[in-house]
Image (cartoon, rainbow, N blue to C red):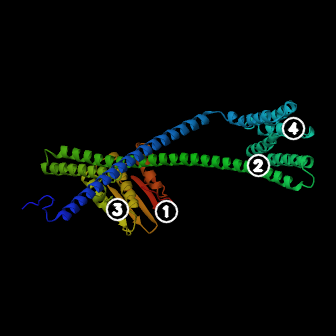
């Protein structure tokens, strides 16, 4: 059933009126909340606009300050030095009486104008200011331009040595004493004299501090430049050393393996009709030698790259691999016998690599420069401090006795031996044949990276 409108016949008129009042009150509260929300939104928009304007103003002010600073830095120092004399002259012109103006302007100019050239000739400018101040004292005229003495003293202390600073300080202190004796009131001599003396000492100390700071910064810049030059030189030396190492390593790998492959190829060609089995074996050995050469090259070049896995997969060759090297040389036509005396497991990997490369290069030279039927012998004597390498062969001597074959082999062996303090000896043997001998020192006296 629907509720009837209030009236004389309605049983609940009071309840209906209360409901109407509550509805009207809710409507008024809603309108008030809406007005407050609108006001808050307007205030927030105004705050955002003000913040935006403030940020824009601060950016423009910063740009203006940077532009002003750049413009000021472009001005020559003489312009800034002329600012104080201009202010002192303006002060005299605006404060002195007309009858005192000529003398005051002349003395102020004599005191202040030398400051314009104080950076170029600090002692000369100080002397001119001191002379003008003495003339002022003789004429018994007091001027605000006397501050030029302190500025000139500061500049002299900042651009001259200790003796010049002491002389300038003594002159200014004497002037301060004369000024206080003439112009101080009776009974008040000590207070102005102490104050002026304090200003003189402060000007001199600040000048000395500026000179010391400038010298310190100059020394730091020179040291930084020298260190940078030394670092560049060390980097260039390191690059040259690494390039030499890689070149030497590539020479040993390529020369040895190519020599072996050439010898095996000749043997295979010679035996292909008479003994096909030997020719096949030689061809297989050529293939294995080529693979070994590729492995050695990848390992040597992979050291330069941190992401190269071959350097870790294939260890550096050492004394333990000399037996395989001897078998390879024997297959190429140079029977080789290896004798190792003493334990070599304690030797560093770089030292063992040096021994291996020395023996490899010596056997390669023998294979290239001796006829068929030559035998080679390798003796390695290891101790806790030294490793002796002795490689001999039974081949004929070179045409010129006492000379080594041309090329980079023996110079490379000398460099490897010198890296461990050794001295390589290569030459013909008294009983015939050729020998290579050296001793590597492991005590660190000449050790270096191979």
Image x and y of residue 278, in percent: 16, 51
Q: Can residue 367 be seen in this view?
A: no
Q: Say few, some or many: other residues with alpha carbon within 10 Å of mark 4 (under 14 / 14 to 19 / 20 or more).
A: some
Q: Residues within 10 Å of mark 2 (few under 14, many from 20)?
A: many
Eye-nearest disc, 3 or 1 = 1
Where disc 4 sits, the SS reads helix
Callout in the foreground (4, 1): 4
| Spot occupied by residue 230 in the image (x, y as percentages of width and height) | 54, 48
Number of residues whose C-alpha sits closer than 10 Å to that of mark 1, classed few (under 14), some (14–19) or many (20 or more): few
Which residue sits at x=80%, y=53%? Answer: 198
Q: Is residue 69 visible?
A: yes
Circles 2 and 4: CB distance less than 8 Å?
no
Which residue in the structure is indicated by mark 1? 444
Cα separation between marks 3 and 4: 89 Å
Which is closer to the viewer, label 1 or label 2?
2
Mark before the other along the chain sequence, 4 or 1: 4
Q: Where is residue 448 in the image (x, y as percent from the top left)?
A: 46, 57
- Helix, strand or loop for disc 2: helix
Closer to the chain start, of discs 1 and 2, is 2
Which residue in the protein does label 4 denote?
131
Dot placed on the residue nearer the N-terminal end, 3 or 1: 3
Answer with mark 3 or mark 4, whichever residue precedes in sequence: 4
**Whole-number angstrom distance, CA of label 3 to CA of label 1:** 20 Å
Report which residue position mark 3 lands on: 319
Q: Which residue is identified by label 2? A: 203
Up-down relation of residue 89 to residue 42 (above or below):
above
- Outermost front residue: 8
């Amino acid at each position: 059933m629907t509720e009837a409108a209030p009236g004389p016949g309605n049983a609940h008129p009071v309840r209906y009126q209360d409901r109407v009042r509550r509805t009207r009150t809710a409507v008024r509260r809603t309108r008030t909340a809406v007005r407050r929300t609108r006001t808050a939104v307007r205030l927030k928009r105004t705050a955002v606009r003000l913040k935006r304007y403030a940020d824009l103003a601060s950016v423009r002010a910063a740009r203006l300050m940077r532009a002003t600073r750049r413009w000021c830095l472009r001005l020559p120092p003489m312009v800034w030095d002329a600012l104080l004399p201009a202010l002192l002259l303006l002060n005299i012109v605006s404060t002195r009486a007309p009858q005192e103006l000529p003398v005051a302007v002349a003395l102020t100019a004599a005191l202040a104008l030398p400051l314009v050239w104080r950076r170029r000739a600090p002692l000369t400018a100080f002397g001119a200011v001191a002379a003008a101040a003495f003339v002022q004292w003789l004429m018994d005229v007091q001027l605000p331009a006397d501050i030029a003495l302190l500025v000139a003293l500061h500049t002299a202390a900042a651009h001259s040595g200790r003796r010049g600073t002491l002389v300038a300080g003594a002159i200014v202190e004497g002037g301060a004493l004369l000024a206080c004796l003439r112009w101080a009131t009776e009974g008040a001599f000590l207070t102005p004299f102490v104050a002026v003396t304090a200003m003189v000492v402060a000007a001199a100390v600040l000048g000395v501090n500026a000179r010391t700071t400038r010298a310190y910064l100059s020394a730091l810049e020179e040291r930084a430049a020298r260190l940078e030059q030394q670092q560049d030189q060390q980097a260039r030396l390191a690059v040259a050393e690494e390039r030499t190492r890689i070149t030497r390593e590539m020479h040993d790998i390529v020369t040895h393996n190519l020599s072996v492959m050439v010898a095996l190829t000749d043997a295979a060609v010679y035996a292909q009709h008479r003994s096909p089995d030997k020719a096949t074996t030689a061809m297989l050995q050529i293939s294995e030698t080529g693979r070994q050469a590729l492995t050695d090259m990848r390992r040597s070049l992979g050291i330069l790259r941190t992401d190269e896995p071959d350097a870790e997969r294939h260890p550096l060759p050492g004394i333990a691999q000399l037996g395989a090297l001897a078998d390879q040389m024997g297959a190429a036509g140079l029977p080789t016998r290896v004798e190792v005396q003493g334990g070599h497991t304690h030797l560093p990997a770089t030292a063992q690599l040096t021994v291996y490369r020395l023996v490899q290069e010596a056997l390669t030279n023998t294979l290239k420069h001796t006829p068929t039927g030559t035998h080679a012998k390798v003796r390695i004597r290891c101790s806790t401090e030294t490793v002796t390498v002795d490689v001999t062969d039974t081949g004929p001597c070179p045409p010129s006795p006492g000379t080594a074959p041309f090329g980079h082999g023996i110079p490379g062996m000398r460099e490897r031996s010198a890296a461990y303090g050794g001295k390589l000896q290569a030459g013909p043997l008294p009983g015939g044949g050729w020998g290579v001998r050296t001793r590597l020192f492991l005590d660190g006296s000449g050790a270096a990276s191979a």
